[in-house]
Amino acid sequence: MDQKELLDIVTDNAEYIGAYNIRVNGKLLERSTNDFVDIISKKDKDGIDIIVKDNTVNQTILIPVILTKGEITDKVYNDFYIGKNCDIKIIAGCGVDNCSSCTSEHDGIHSFYIGENSKVKYIERHYGHGDGAGKKILNPVTNAVLEKNSYMEMVTTQIEGVDDSKRITNATLKENASMVINEKIMTNLNQKADSEFNVNLNGENSKAKVSSRVVAKDESNQSFYSNVQGNNKCFAHVECDAIIVGNAKVSSVPKIVANCPDASLVHEATIGKIAGEQLLKLLTLGLSESEAEKEILNGFLK
Amino acid sequence: MIELKDICFESDGKQILKNINLKFDNEITVITGPNGAGKSTLAKILMGIIKPTSGSIFYNGQDITNFTITERAKMGFSFAFQQPVKFKGLRVCDILKIANAKKDVALSKYLKNVGLCSKEYMTRELSGDLSGGELKRIEIATVLARGTKVNIFDEPEAGIDLWSFNNLVKTFEDFQKEISGIFIMISHQEKMIEFANKIILLNAGKVEKIGTKDEVMPLLLNINKSCKGCGV
């Protein structure tokens, strides 16, 4: 698989027209900035500062990372400083193509400081490819601070190909801030994926909606842990749905804490095989069992 | 034509269906009877969801007793479940697309025919966000979208409000006019029984009567009145 194909998968064929920063095998390949978005390399460690000016709208920022070699550990710190009254989209992610027998690992630590009244859609896609015995490991961390009246939507996708991943998302929400997180993970073979969410609802009327939909196939193993702290009059809904195919194992550990009597917090979790009646319905529509299973799983992870 | 020959079904040592012999032609047949008569079991046996303990099923002369659900669906059998299934992730348009073997573009008409606005419903998920009545209508729409020759509806009126129910009867009439196929419906509703060409009264796993509304209704009311156990 070549570099371009990997980039297209990670950024979902987005066009490189605005500000972007492409990192390949631990080094900067290409960067572009404009009047609204500046990207500066960090001096003390690997990584960049992405600075978005106040009132920036209709900008898409692309921050892909590609690893095409084995025996590489790439740890990178990307800090996003988003001004006030912005409305922007950020697409980040990591594509690993490792055909060697050595491990390749990418740990992306992304921190967001989202200014008052700003709106950010953050899309993070993870993809692993390669037949070699070398493991593909990804450990992304997202830290987000949402200022008053700001909004962040975070969409993360990891569909097969990654041997081991531990994702941590930490968020702090101030007054009237809202956060929506949609996570989709599919593991197969002996892969392992852990996901942890720590959300602090500090501001009055802050809201968080976390939805995790995962499919665990074969002998893979997934765990979901969420810790939502309601420290003010706030609302949170955490939902974790897992479908097991084969001998996979899934655990879901919810924790919701109301430190304020006006906090309203909900957690829902379901784990199980594909429901028999769902298969039956699709069989009556003319699908075979394998086609029905595919439709159900694809829809679930859409 | 579908022909059932000596169909029996046993579950946990209990005989649910006893030597059922029936023929279904290109017309509307309503199967009615008290709760526990074996109506839904019979419908599921027709679709291949349940295998009969003994007996045979023929469709246009071909023995289809051992055909799977998928094989029957591909031959032109469709089935509307009594309890619609929920899917997380699949949207109304997704399931209608799967159902629509004719691959016509205007899927919206199938929603319209069950009294749902396509703009409002097409992209909604088939999950708990929809009410029981809405899910039921979508379930019926999946059968309409298939447009097959054999259509089996298990209590299509359940959960549908009165206003929609009257429209549903009209939809079924139009659908049958268009398809001219084998239309089998499990129902307790007098209105459904009224528009059927043939009514089959099932009681305690046996065919008690095949006839018109006037012939069957008095018998059905009689069964419902008498309860041998408590003498009511």
Image (cartoon, grey):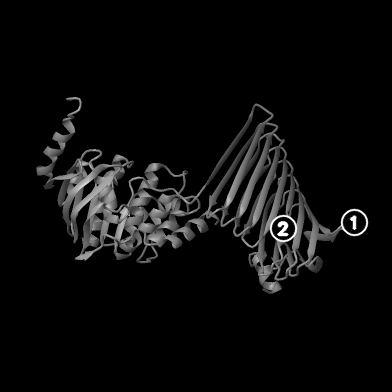
Chain letter of mark 1 equals A
User: Element at badge 2?
Assistant: strand
Q: Residue furthest right?
A: A44
Instruction: Kindly indicate whether the residues beneath marks 1 and 2 are on one polypeptide chain.
Output: yes
User: Element at badge 1?
Assistant: loop
Q: Residue furthest bottom?
A: A2
* Drawn side of residue B33 relative to residue A249, left or right: left
Q: Pointer 2: what residue?
A: A138
Which of the pair B206/A93 is nearer the observer?
A: B206
Residue found 31% across the figure and 54% down from its top: B79
* Drawn side of residue B183 relative to residue A55, left or right: left
Which corner quadrant of the image does residue A264 belong to?
Answer: top right
Residue B150 seen: yes
Chain letter of mark 2 equals A
* Drawn side of residue A201 relative to residue A45, left or right: left
Residue A156: image location, x then y, percent: 65, 54
**Rounded to the nearest whole Å, what is the CA distance between mark 1 and mark 2?**
23 Å
Residue found 33% across the figure and 46% down from its top: B82
Residue B25: image location, x then y, percent: 17, 59
Residue A220: image location, x then y, percent: 61, 55
Amino acid residing under circle 2: Leu
Which of the pair B200/A77 is nearer the observer?
A: B200
Residue B97: image location, x then y, percent: 41, 61
Q: Residues within 10 Å of mark 1 (few under 14, many from 20)?
A: few
Which corner quadrant of the image does residue A29 belong to?
Answer: bottom right
Front disc: 1 or 2:
2
The label on residue A44 is 1
Residue found 61% across the figure and 43% down from its top: A252
Mark positioned earlier in the residue sequence (1 or 2): 1
* Drawn side of residue A96 relative to residue B119, left or right: right
Q: Residues within 10 Å of mark 2 (few under 14, many from 20)?
A: many
Amino acid residing under circle 1: Asp
